[in-house]
């Protein structure tokens, strides 16, 4: 899975850099962005029937986005901690699901994305998503890595405001428990919001993100994790 | 969703930080048009109304399909349209220019509708028409006559009210909208007389004032009268001839429509039996602003030409040769990325996430 992801990303990067463009000198640059996400994580482990719901937490993200004419290549990194006071997500092992409560879970997420605006306002993208949850004080890690695609669009509302949205789907990914393969998974994400253009290079974003990852363990357990939240971001564009 | 305070706290910090970093951008935007001397480069810098793209739709109708009465072929409408296109692009930084040659009724309507969709706030839009015009003397309604007009069947013409409606849509989005009509009876498009030239015309304060106010103006070749086709075998109608002449000989960095029309009206009236008119399009949101032509290649007394820089935001066209031609005037622009600001808003699209 890792090798496939690396090869796919390399192909995407080479094809992106190689795309001929008459705008090469005019429409190329990198934007750097920061994002704060106030999220709630909740879900259910099927066999045990236990549900979970975070009581505190949030994420901080950073992203780099290289653009050349209609094409873009980006990487985003985000992470945070979630507190579960009463009911936390089960620790799913090969012998069954163990309950977890009154603890913290560290969350890390990396996205690598390559996309192209096939239409004036709409782009299609492919990429790799990798997320990891680490149950604090339990020595338990659970990760999901998958390749998928999606569609995103941006529509101007007026000179200052844009509306944008994106939907992504990973049909199949690899689930690992403490770095050993333990199952498969899939992921869907929907994000939409507004962009406020502060200047030609600066923008604010404000929006909502809804993400669901379903872990299907080889043991037969299935765990669904929903991460829904409000985010605010700022980014700056560096043309070159 | 449960923890909005975390977002609000950090978001507030980001907003403050951003305002700090962008303080200079804000101050520049609030100035509108300025003529200032920069110490660093010893350059006069003309900063027009920010973010406004200059767009034009130019229509020239020579080859009327009937070819005889009532709509004989014209000699100069098309050459006039080409000349207007060239001077707007070359001398006045119009970056989005569409030329319609021998346009049918449908061509004109589609082009106007497409233009209205392209227009963004703060844009400056000019529509130029050269071709036959028609006046129904019973109803006193005026029309543009497209090349596919059928005799005197008015349903095949473009009624002034239709043109006015399309312009009103464009004007609702743009900062400045100007219609220049070089046809017979084009004065019937007007609903009020010339506003004249203000006492403080030509001052920085004046330009600043009129640039920031919305304008929807019309300049016509004549009132309710026939107009000439070929002036002194120049290849242009008298109106377009003197319009081009004024635009060519103008050496001021900023030229308002009132200033331009005043000179053109005098020149035309002094040479032919025709009196151009100008005014506003009633009911389209005119706030006594002025369409301002910004001359790209200006001279300023006492300042060497190489030390003058005109700051015009230009969106390059998609075809390579035209793009080069249009970018040339702003070759000294320090921030070329601003030329594509609105058209390429997609570059500001947030990175999607999985």
Image (tube, grey):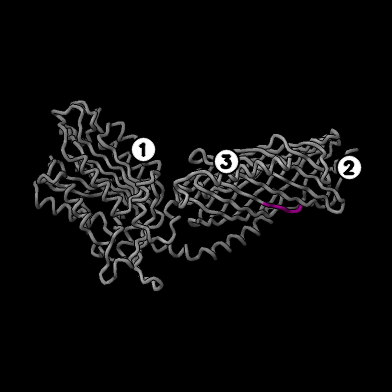
Q: Chain under label 3?
A: A
The extreme right residue here reads A95
Instruction: Give the side of residue B74 with respect to residue A63, left or right.
Output: left
Residue B346 within the magenta-colored segment of the rendering: no
Q: Tag 3's secondary structure?
A: strand
Please determine if labels 1 and 3 lie on a single subunit: no
Q: Which quarter of the rendering shows the C terminus of chain B?
A: top right
Please determine if labels 2 and 1 lie on a single subunit: no
Residue behind mark 2: A98
The image position of residue A96, as x and y in percent, is: 89, 38
The image position of residue A139, as x and y in percent, is: 86, 51
Q: Tag 2's secondary structure?
A: strand
Task: State how far apart marks 3 and 2 are (Cα).
Answer: 39 Å
Residue shown at the point (26%, 40%) measured from the top left: B59
Q: Chain under label 1?
A: B
Task: State how far apart marks 2 and 1 are (Cα).
Answer: 64 Å
Residue behind mark 1: B113
Q: Tag 1's secondary structure?
A: helix
Residue B351 can be seen in this image: yes
Depth check: give the residue in front, A179 or B208: A179
Prevailing SS of the magenta stretch = strand
Task: State how far apart marks 1 and 3 are (Cα).
Answer: 27 Å
The extreme bottom residue here reads B39
Residue shown at the point (59%, 56%) measured from the top left: A32
């Amino acid at each position: 899975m890792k090798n496939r992801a690396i090869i796919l990303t390399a192909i995407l990067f080479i094809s992106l850099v190689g795309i001929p463009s008459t705008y090469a000198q005019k429409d190329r640059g990198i934007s750097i962005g920061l994002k704060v996400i106030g999220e709630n994580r909740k879900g259910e482990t099927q066999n045990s029937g236990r549900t979970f719901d975070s009581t505190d937490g949030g994420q901080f993200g950073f992203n780099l986005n290289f653009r050349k004419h209609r094409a873009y290549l980006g990487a985003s990194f985000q992470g945070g901690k979630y507190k579960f006071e009463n009911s936390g997500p089960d620790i799913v092992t090969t012998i069954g699901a163990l309950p977890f409560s009154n603890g913290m879970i560290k969350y890390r997420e990396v996205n690598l994305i390559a996309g192209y605006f096939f239409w004036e306002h709409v782009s299609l993208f492919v990429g790799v998503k990798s997320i990891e949850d680490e149950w604090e004080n339990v020595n338990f890690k659970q990760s999901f890595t998958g390749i998928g695609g999606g569609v995103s669009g941006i529509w101007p509302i007026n000179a200052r405001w844009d509306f944008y949205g994106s939907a992504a789907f990973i049909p199949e990914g690899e689930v690992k428990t403490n770095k050993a393969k333990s199952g498969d998974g899939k992921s869907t994400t929907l994000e939409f919001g507004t962009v406020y253009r502060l200047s030609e290079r600066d923008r604010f974003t404000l929006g909502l993100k809804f993400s669901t990852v379903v872990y299907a363990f080889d043991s037969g357990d299935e765990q669904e994790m929903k991460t829904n939240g409000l985010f605010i971001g700022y980014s700056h564009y560096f043309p070159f | 969703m449960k923890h909005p305070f975390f977002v609000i706290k950090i978001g507030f910090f980001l907003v403050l930080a951003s305002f700090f970093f962008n303080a200079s951008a804000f101050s520049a935007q609030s100035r509108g048009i300025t003529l200032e001397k920069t110490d660093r480069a010893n350059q006069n810098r003309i900063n027009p109304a920010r973010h406004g793209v200059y767009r034009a739709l130019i229509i020239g109708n020579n080859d009327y399909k009937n070819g005889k009465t009532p709509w004989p072929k014209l000699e100069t409408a098309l050459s006039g349209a080409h000349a207007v296109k060239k001077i707007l692009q070359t001398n006045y930084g119009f970056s989005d220019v569409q030329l319609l040659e021998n346009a049918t009724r449908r061509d004109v309507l589609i082009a106007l509708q497409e233009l209205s969709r392209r227009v963004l706030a703060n844009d400056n839009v000019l529509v130029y028409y050269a071709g036959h015009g028609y006046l129904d003397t019973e109803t006193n309604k005026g029309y543009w006559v497209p090349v596919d007009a059928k005799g005197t069947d008015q349903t095949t013409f473009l009624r002034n009210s239709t043109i006015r409606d399309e312009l009103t849509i464009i004007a609702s989005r743009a900062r400045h909208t100007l219609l220049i009509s070089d046809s017979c009876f084009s004065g019937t498009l007007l609903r009020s007389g010339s506003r004249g030239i203000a006492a403080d015309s030509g001052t920085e304060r004046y330009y600043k004032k009129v640039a920031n106010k919305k304008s929807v103006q019309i300049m016509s070749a004549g009132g309710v009268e026939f107009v000439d086709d070929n002036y002194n075998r120049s290849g242009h109608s008298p109106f377009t001839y003197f319009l081009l002449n004024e635009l060519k000989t103008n050496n001021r960095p900023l030229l308002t429509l009132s200033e331009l029309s005043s000179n053109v009206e005098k020149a035309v009236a002094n040479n032919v039996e025709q009196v151009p008119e100008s005014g506003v399009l009633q009911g389209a949101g005119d706030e006594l602003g002025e369409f301002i032509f910004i001359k790209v290649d200006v001279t300023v007394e006492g300042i060497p030409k190489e030390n003058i820089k005109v700051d015009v935001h230009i969106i390059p066209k998609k075809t390579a040769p035209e793009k080069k031609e249009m970018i040339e005037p702003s070759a000294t622009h320090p921030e070329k990325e601003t030329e594509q600001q609105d058209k390429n808003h997609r570059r500001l699209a947030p990175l999607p996430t999985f």
